[in-house]
Amino acid sequence: QVQLVESGGGLVQAGGSLRLSCAASGRTLSRYSMGWFLQSPGKEREFVAAIKRSGGSTVYADSVKDRFTISRDNAKNTVYLQMNSLKPEDTAVYYCAGKDSSFLYSRQIRYDYWGQGTQVTVYA
């Protein structure tokens, strides 16, 4: 099975940018459809973005379209989430998730593997 480790979170002013990374080990990342999710305090985990294992297709939550970009480098076994124009409401723990599949998934129940999360805090 694959192990996922997120990094790149931190404290940023509104309007700023961060790039999150999700590094995979144990198995090659190219087998996995990947997603990013976020969880704000007191709320359920929610979908942010997903990318097919080939990298050919992506899907985004409406709240992050045109601000966030998901990408992957299978040679580096890493998935990224570039976050621009950050808002205080983007503050959350961000998780990456993986599914051994060629399809694209936005529902967290579809994913089998999860990282431990990385905190993103956006201040006004």
Image (cartoon, grey):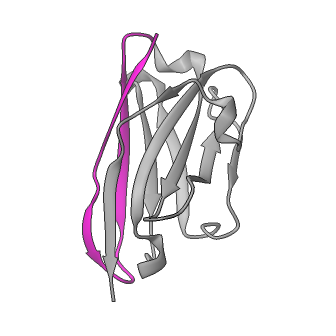
Residue appearing at x 73%, y 35% in the figure: 104
Q: Is residue 41 magenta?
A: no
User: Looking at the rendering, which quadrant does residue 63 occupy?
Assistant: bottom right
Specify the segment rendered in magenta.
Answer: 1-27
Q: In this image, 17 relative to 97: left or right?
A: left
Name the residue at the right extreme: 103
Name the residue at the bottom extreme: 124
Q: Nearer the viewer, residue 72 or 45?
A: 45
Q: Position of residue 40 (x, y in %)?
A: 46, 64
Q: Is residue 20 magenta?
A: yes
Q: Is residue 17 above or below residue 2?
A: below
Total marks drawn? 0
Q: Nearer the viewer, residue 12 or 110?
A: 110
Residue appearing at x 68%, y 60% in the figure: 61
Q: In this image, 107 relative to 64: left or right?
A: right
Q: Position of residue 4 (x, y in %)?
A: 38, 28
Residue 87: tell me if it is visible. Answer: no
Residue appearing at x 44%, y 63% in the figure: 83
Q: Position of residue 113 (x, y in %)?
A: 50, 25
Q: Principal SS element in the magenta part?
A: strand
Q: Position of residue 98 (x, y in %)?
A: 55, 28
